[in-house]
Amino acid sequence: MTAPLSAWDLEQGDAAARALHKVWWLFLVDGIISLVIGFLALSWRHETLTALAIFLGIWLLVVGVVQFASAFAAIRERWLYAVAGFLTAAVGVVTIVWPHITLFVIAMLLAWTLLVWGIIYIVASLMSREVPHWWIGLIKGIVLILLGVWAIRHPGNALTVLVVVFGLACVFWGILELIAGVVARHAGREWERERAAQAKG
């Protein structure tokens, strides 16, 4: 039997449900774009590195903007998501504006971005274990860290890092964003059921 929710818990739950309901479509858009770019990256030809770098920049920009906007729906650590979203979007802009910077620099930008995002998601999810589906953020964080570490440990093979890690990260991110969008879409209903159960209890 769960402990009764306090007035503060109810207020926070109402606010979170409303916020998630407003931004659920952002997760879906982010997921679809990420999947498309990921599959394109995994099937891309090596002689078109400039275009691949631009795709990377577009993806980071989209992810950054979506995460910055969705930070306002976070229950805790909103500033952390907002800062990370802003920095990710900034890296995306740099990559789009200067796609001809060295392949190594582009690969390392991707690697460190994944690593930072992974740490943020793990910390945020562990601090919000009372939130339904908190484990989605934990899984996302672990996989992003693994991809980031692998990329950093293979600086001599920047092409493989850029193509494989970028493609896998996009596909993985896209799948979890779609799941997050569905969860956020129905967050209001789940919260109403929780409130009803608390009222009956």
Image: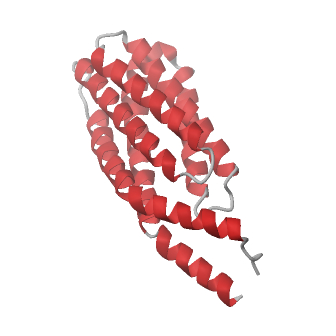
- Where's the C terminus, which quadrant? bottom right
Q: Nearer the viewer, residue 77 or 51?
A: 77
Q: Quadrant of residue 142?
A: top right
Q: Is residue 199 visible?
A: yes
Q: Nearer the viewer, residue 4 or 41?
A: 4
Q: Residue at x 33, y 27 (%)?
A: 57
Q: Position of residue 53 (x, y in %)?
A: 30, 22
In the rendered structure, the answer to whether residue 56 lies left or right of residue 153 reads left
In the rendered structure, the answer to whether residue 129 lies left or right of residue 14 reads right
Q: Residue at x 45, y 42 (%)?
A: 67
Q: Residue at x 34, y 10 (%)?
A: 101
In the rendered structure, the answer to whether residue 154 lies left or right of residue 37 reads right
- Where's the N terminus, which quadrant? bottom right
Q: Position of residue 129 (x, y in %)?
A: 68, 58
Q: Position of residue 89 (x, y in %)?
A: 40, 30
Q: Is residue 51 above or below residue 8?
A: above
Q: Nearer the viewer, residue 126 or 151?
A: 126
Q: Position of residue 138 (x, y in %)?
A: 61, 49
